[in-house]
Amino acid sequence: MNHSLLRIAIVCTTIAIPALGQDLVAIKAKTIHTITGPSIQDGVILLQNGRIKTIAKASDVEIPWSATVIDASDKIVMPTWVLAHSSGGMRGSNESMQNVPWLTVADAIDPASTYFEGMLRNGVGTVHVLPGNNTLLAGSGLVVRPFGRTVEDMTVAANTGMKMSLLARGGSRLQKIREMRRAIAEIREYLANFHREKAEFEKEQAAGAIPEDKKWEKEIDRKKQAAVDLIEKKLKGWLYVPSFAELDEALRMGKDLDLNFVLGANLDEAMPLLTKLKAAVVLDDALEYFETDPETRKEKQYCSAKMLADAGVPFALSLASSGPSSYPWWQFGTCVRNGISRQQALEALTMVPAKMLGLSDQIGSLEVGKLGNIQILTGDPLQATTWVDTVVLEGAVVYERSKDPRLKYLFEAAKKADEPKATSKKDEGK
Amino acid sequence: MTRPIVQVLLQASVTLLLTALATAQQEVTAYTNAHILPGGKPTISNATMVVSGGKILALGGADVKVPDGAKVIDCKGMTITPGLIDASFQSSNNQQDLNEQSEEVTPHLRILDNIDPEDPLFRRARNNGVTAVHIMPGTRNVIGGLGCVIKTYGSDPKSMVIKADASMRIVMGAEPSNGNRAIRGGRVNSMYYRRPTSRMGVIWSVRRAFYDAKEALTKTQGAPGDAPPSPGTQIMMQVLQGKLTAVTTARSEQDLRTALRIAEEFGYETVIDEAQDAYMVADELAKKNAVVMLGAPSAETISGSAAQDGSAPRSGTVAVLASKGIRFVITTGTNPSALPLIREAMFAHRFGLGPQLALDAITIEPAKLLGLDDRIGSLATGKDADFVIWSHNPLDPAAVAVSVHINGMSVSQPR
């Protein structure tokens, strides 16, 4: 079932995105952060057939009488977040066989997974689901929206790339690098053999040894097709580079293949190499780590995002599926705390990943013609106390905090716990 | 012959050093234009704090007079809070070092004997604004021993100590029995060859220790020639007499109820550590006036995901406790992936706790719980000059500790 979907997607390489919302929707906002342009105070966004039709100051727009109005005139309106690399929402994200480029995440995505629910609650509108980091050549990914009952419903774009990983679990780093080289060499060899056989066939046919009406029938092995696409640069590779130690090899691989790098946090020892990264990279959800000088025992804290920012390399952020780094505001806070600008932090979950996915004409900012993927926030996106109030995907409301059953108890308790009146009445000390 | 001269020289240099240190401490410093959250009280804006000799000399609004000759530090835009207190801090000692395995009930062991001032976790803690910590023995023993409160800066444990025997740890639940197996000959080379092997066994070990103490208490007036109670029993007696706080580690709903029951049975004040499921038994906790220590709110999830000992830490637990008027503190606890303490308070704030309560839960509340609120946990005249200057509102995820002071001295490293 999913294979047919994928094949269709592969055949038409242009991305056809079905619109969820068909009607006119108007969103009134206190502040609109467009990401690519200046912020607009007291603005209005008009959506038609799931796309942004107008975005302007309220005084300059007349809201059509037929539009459904979402009143966020005391809230912040932004594009939904984009995740360029995630292994969430799958039932089993790591194949234990190491060389399985023919697999696809479409067969593992569980639309009912609480992961997608959580992502929507955090304002994520687009997720590039890829296999986990434990497999060498792990299979193809899929760009989905965290909303829908089937994988087909959720799919935004297919043919977005193959996951590769240099993570050595239990083995040595060098061994992993050697395995990767061998795997790629085997595909090259396979392809060379295939072309040689075909050339021989044609030569023999021309010489009359094979009847003229006989056609060349051999096809690329289906299990090898994705890997062949990878080495022919028809398919992008998403290479997980766990640390500084594998970066050199990753850069070498990037010369022959069309690769996006997903970098682990531990990069300080490869700082001079970072400037050699030409394109944007994705960062692991863990951004900070400690390094102890073996001689002085002095400990230093590093932040991978800051190192890349200093090297002038654009980066996209990741979100963990649970814990503090599953919250966008915490990831932004970590960036800003380490000296990265707010704008650069915000772009790391909007424009940068959108560009990496080749979807920057559709998502990643609020601009006329782009998809109506919009989140409404109760406050500043960098504050701990801010909540996602509403998520609109392609013009349709897909999440409302007031109707989120899992948050209900939280806000009831919070209301009661509001400020000092409740302070320890049994304040006897000790 | 040269020895006396060397000695004199040495003594002289030591005296010189000490005087130099003393004068450094006598220096008067005024922090002005700050936003001060004094702990337990509302914010003072445009505040001045005067510090000298390791103590706070004066604190108040802009009307506080800066003494002549004082060094003035302008803290415009910055926020000052009391030094944070982590009421359940884990040092980086390995489990073998934190848990004595020769016995499962060891009330008389002192974690103070196991403190390494060079532990990088103290440095990390103080760089993140934590100036005092309560450390307890590990959670593998039923009764692990005595906890202590120390400041996070010092060259040897003695100079760090604020309160040597501050608490005694009792552990409920499956952790003290996990994996335990009976000894069947051979060498006892693993901490798993031991009792108890079940929850029932764990609780029985607690009871028996208290029974022994009870019996010893009735005997204190006994006949001359009676052997004194064992050191462990003497500690248990202090708990029964209300002289020492028993901190009970209990995570799941079941273990929390057991902790309340045992405390009632033996009549000691209930302080519960790692109380992940506290939201499920909030009414009972309120009824018993229990104090709750909650570890790592950042690890809580919206739907309460399965965690240690069958507990389900759920976002907003402290908000529930606050709404019921239960006393609580926020700690980093035993969770290895806990964030710095200030961020844990920030998460509690996100999940519904007001900003002042969130900060109180890591400053004045733990100070009260540990019986040290006359010295630390809040900023007021005469208290220890343990404070943190933050870049701005410390509950902002982007805030950083600009400088951290213990006894008036700056002890933080630049980032």
Image: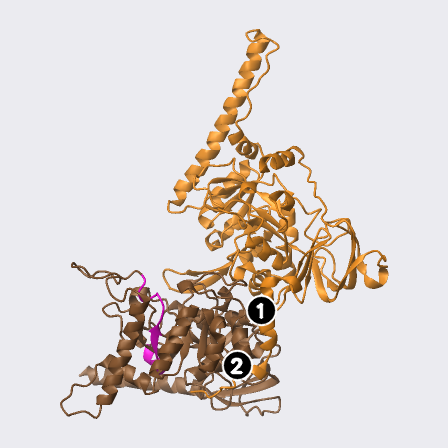
Chain colours: A orange, B brown
Q: In the visual, does B160 lie left or right of A187?
A: left
Q: Tell me where residue A385 appears, x and y as whole percent.
A: 61, 69
Decide if residue B141 is in sight here: no
Q: In the visual, does A265 lie left or right of B174?
A: right
Q: Secondary structure at mark 1?
A: helix
Q: In the visual, does B369 lie left or right of A60?
A: left
Q: Tell me where residue B172 appears, x and y as whole percent.
A: 35, 71
Res B274 quadrant in image: bottom left
Residue sitting nearer the eye, B337 or B23: B337
Which residue, as the protein is rendered here, is positioned at the far left? B225
Q: Residue at x 30, y 85 (%)?
A: B238
Image height check: is A78 above or below A143? Answer: below
Q: Secondary structure at mark 2?
A: loop
> Number of numbered discs present?
2
Q: In the visual, does B31 lie left or right of A77?
A: left
Q: Quadrant of the N terminus of chain B?
A: bottom left
Image height check: is B236 above or below B124? Answer: below
How far apart marks 1 and 2 lie (CA) works out to: 17 Å
Q: What residue does disc 1 label?
A: A410
Is B56 colored magenta in this rendering?
no
Q: What residue does disc 2 label?
A: B325
Image height check: is A283 above or below A31? Answer: above
Decide if residue A177 is in sight here: yes
Task: Tell which subunit mark 1 falls on.
Answer: A
Q: Residue at x 60, y 49 (%)?
A: A127
Q: Tell me where residue A301 appears, x and y as whole percent.
A: 47, 63
Which label was assigned to residue A141?
none
Residues drawn in magenta: B157-178
Q: Callout 1, which amino acid?
A: Leu
Q: Callout 2, which amino acid?
A: Gly
Label 1: how many Cα within 10 Å (few below 14, some 14–19, many 20+): some
